[in-house]
Amino acid sequence: MKTASEFSSPPQDYNVIVPDGWFQLSLEPEERDRCIAALADLQFRGIDNAPHLREQFMRDVQRKAKDAYDVGGMELYLSTLVVGPVPLASSLLTSMPDPDEWPRCSDAEELAEHLAVLDGGEPEGELGVVPLDVAGMAVRRRRRDAPDPAAQLGNTLPTTTLTYYVPIPATTRWLMLSFSTPVDPLADQMVELFDAVAGTLHWVA
C-alpha cells in the first residue's frame, strides 16, 4: 500500500473501509434505482403493512442520491445499524469537486486557511489539518447544523457533519469525505467512528 508521498503519477482509485451495516449506494443513474430498491428491501424486511412508508423512504433516498450526484458525488454509504430501538443513522458521501469551482489550493494548510477566510476569520465548528495514516495530510472540519427535514429524510434533529478534504496525489484535485449523523446525543461517539473510517482511506496505484 503506497503512501501519498510515494505517488509520482495520479492514483487510479481510492478505497475506504466502512463498518458492517453500512449500505453502499451507487450514484450512477443507471444503477441508482436498483440500489435504492435493494436498500428498501433491507430496511423493510419483515414489514409488509407499510407500503406508504416504504414508498416515502425510497423517494427520500432518491432525492438524496440525486442531490449527491449533482455535486460530484461518487459513492454514498448509508448506515442500517440499530442499537436496541435506536437507529444509528449516518451517511458517508465521497465526492470530487469540479476544479473550476474549487479554490486553487496546493496543500491542506492552504485550503484550511482559505476555508477560515470564507468563514470571516472565525471558523464555524472545528477546522484544522490532520494526518491520515496512508492518504496524507487532510483538512478536517466538524460542524453542527440546524435540522433540514426536507433534505435529511425527515430528520428534525440537529445534524453533525464531519468533512475531510484530501488532496489527490500528483494532481490539483481533491477528494471529499462527507460524514453526517442526526443522532445528536451520540454525536461525539459517531464522530470517533467517522474519524476511524477516514483513517482507512488509501490510494490505489
Image: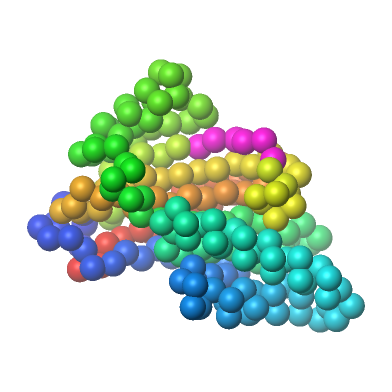
- Residue 133: image location, x then y, percent: 31, 52
- Residue 73: image location, x then y, percent: 44, 59
Q: Nearer the viewer, residue 82 or 171?
A: 171
- Residue 74: image location, x then y, percent: 42, 63
Residue at horizontal 83 percent and vertical 75 percent from the top: 51
Q: Which residue lies furthest to the right in this view?
A: 49
- Residue 24: image location, x then y, percent: 52, 70
Residue at horizontal 28 percent and vertical 55 percent from the top: 134
Residue at horizontal 48 percent and vertical 50 percent from the top: 178
Residue at horizontal 79 percent and vertical 62 percent from the top: 84
**Is 83 left, or right, of 23 in this rendering?**
right
- Membership of 146 in magenta stretch: yes
**Which color scheme is applied?**
rainbow
- Membership of 144 in magenta stretch: yes
Q: Is residue 79 visible?
A: no
Look at the image and tell me in which quarter the N terminus lies: bottom left
Count the marks: 0
Q: Residue furthest top?
A: 121
**Is 103 left, or right, of 95 in this rendering?**
left
Look at the image and tell me in which quarter the C terminus lies: bottom left
Q: Is residue 153 visible?
A: yes
* Figure quadrant of residue 184: top right
> Which stretch is magenta?
142-147
Query: Magenta stretch mostly in which secondary structure?
Result: strand
**Is 114 left, or right, of 70 in this rendering?**
left
Q: Which of 48 and 2 is in front in this view?
A: 48
Q: Which of 3 and 122 is in front in this view?
A: 122
Q: Which residue lies furthest to the left in this view?
A: 8
The correct choice, above or below, for 2 with respect to 49 in the image is: above
